[in-house]
Image (tube, rainbow, N blue to C red):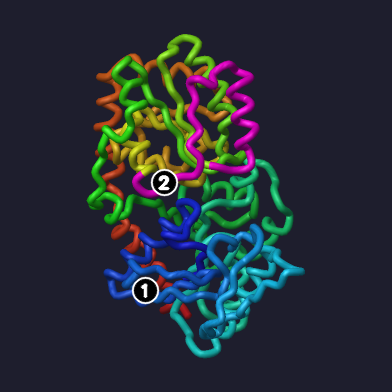
Amino acid sequence: MLGWELPPHNSGGLGVACLNLSKSLSKFGTSIDFVVPYRAEHKNIKFMNVLSASNLNPLFRFGAGAYASANATLPFSLNFSASPSSDQISIREIQKSYIEFVENYLKEYKPDVVHAHDWLTFEAGMLAKKNYGIPLIAHVHATEFDRAGGQSGSPLVEEIEREGLLMADKIFAVSNATREIIHKKYDIPLEKIDVVYNSLGEDFINSLYSFDDSEHVYINLLKENGFCIVSTVGRFTIQKGLTHLLHAAAKAIHKNPKLVFILAGDGEEKSELISLAAELGISRNVIFTGFIRGKNLRDIYSFSDIFVMSSVSEPFGLTALEAAHHGDALILTKQSGVSEILKSAFKYDFWDEDKLANEILAIAASPALRKTLQTNIKNEYSKISWDDIAKQCLDVYNKLRKHN
C-alpha cells in the first residue's frame, strides 16, 4: 500500500479510508506494508506494518513549510535535515524521497500487488510496475478535476494522474461519478475501472463516544428557542462549494431567521467566506469553528439537525456517512459520490441555491420529515461494510497475481 496519510496524522477522509480498508483486508489474511511519507507513531495500528519513507514531520508532508528531522536511521529512509538557510521543502522533493524509499524497499522485498492511493503515490507505483513487474492498482479518491472544482487544475498533477492510470493494471474509483471522470478526462476504458465505495469503520461505529449536550450551553439555548442547526464539515476550498452554501443560507434565513449554520473546517477560502457572511448580513447566524477532529467533530454531528454537503465535485464524501450515523438529515449535491448510495437524502445541483434553501426550510419545518430521512438513510448506509469492500479488492488482487 502506498499512501500519503493515516490517522491520527490525517487531514481528511483519505487516511481514514486507507486505514479501514487495510484493517478489513488484514482480517482475510492479507499482509500489508503501508508506506507513508513522514515519520510518526501509529500506536493503534497493529494489523499492518507502517513504513516511513523519510523523517519528515507529518504536519509538513504537503510541503507546507519548515520540517522536523530525526536523527534515528530508518530502513531505506532519506533523513531530511533542515538548515536555517533552507527551511522549506516542496511536495516534489517529498515525492522524490518517497519514490527512492520504495525503490530501495523493492530491492529487498517483492509484494504480490502494489496498491497506490491518489496521484501523490502514483509515480512510486509506476516504478514498481515498470522496474520490478509488480501488478499496480491505482486507487482514485479524487482527481485533479475534482480538486479544482470541476475545472482543469495543475498540468503536472494531471499528467501524473494520466500516466498512473494508463500504466495501472486495474483502477479503483470511489464512485460511478469518479469512474466517469476518469473515463472521459483521461480516455481510460470503463472495463478497466472498478467502483469501490467507502464505508464507515467499525471503530467509528462502535466507539465509546458519548455526546454530552451540557457541554454546549449556547447551542442548547438556541435549540430550546426553536433554532434548527445546519452544519457542514470539510476543507474551505473551491471544491466544496461553500460560497453557494452561504448564498443559499441567506435565502433560507430571510424566510426563517431561526436557522444557524455551522461551518467546520479551514482552508484558503476562510477569509472570503467570513467576509461573504458579513456582506450577506447573516454573520449572526453563521459559526466558523476552524479545523476540528475527534470528539469535537462528533459533537457537531450530534447536535446538528441537518448536514449539507455542498461540493462542486465530491468523489465520495465520507463526512456524510459520519453525519448520518449521528442522526442528521442529509442534503447532498448530485455531484457527490455518496449520493449514489444514499437514495433517501435530499439532493440538488451545487449551483441551485434556491433549491438548497427550500430543502433546508422544508426539513427545518417538519420534524416528521427529518425523522423519516434519518431512518431511511441509516438503512441504506448500513448495508455497505469495509469487509465487503475488502473482499472485492482481494478478488482483484488474486486475479492480478495469477495473471502475472
Q: Identify whether 303 is placed above or below 174.
A: above
Q: Is residue 242 magenta?
A: no
The reply to whether callout 1 and callout 2 are in contact (CB within 8 Å) is no
Crowding at dot 2, Cα within 10 Å, few <14 / some 14-19 / many 20+, comes out as: many
Counting from the top left corner in percent of width and height, residue 282 is at 54, 18
The amino acid at mark 1 is Met
In the picture provided, is 86 more to the left or to the right than 38?
A: right
Work out whether residue 162 can be spotted.
Answer: no
| Viewer-closest of 326 and 272 | 272
Question: Which SS class for mark 2?
Answer: helix
Q: Is residue 116 above or below residue 71?
A: above
Rendered position, 324 above or below 90: above
Query: Which residue is drawn at the image coordinates 61% and 47% (left, top)?
Result: 147
Disc 1 secondary structure class: loop
Where residue 200 appears, as percent x and y from the top left, is: 33, 50
View extreme (top): residue: 255
Three-letter residue code for mark 2: Leu
Q: Residue furthest front?
A: 84
Residue placed most toward the observer, 155 or 189: 155
Query: Which residue in the rendered view is the most extreme toward the right?
Result: 85
Left-right relation of 156 to 11? right
Disc number for residue 318: 2
Residue at screen point 57% across, 77% down: 129
Q: Earlier in the sequence, mark 1 or mark 2?
A: 1
The magenta stretch spans residue 294: yes
| Residue that appears at 51% across and 90% down | 108
Look at mark 1 in the image and give the residue it sits on. Answer: 48
Stretch in magenta: 266-295
x and y, in percent, of residue 166 in the image = 62, 64
Q: Which one is nearer the viewer's eye here, 168 or 83?
A: 83
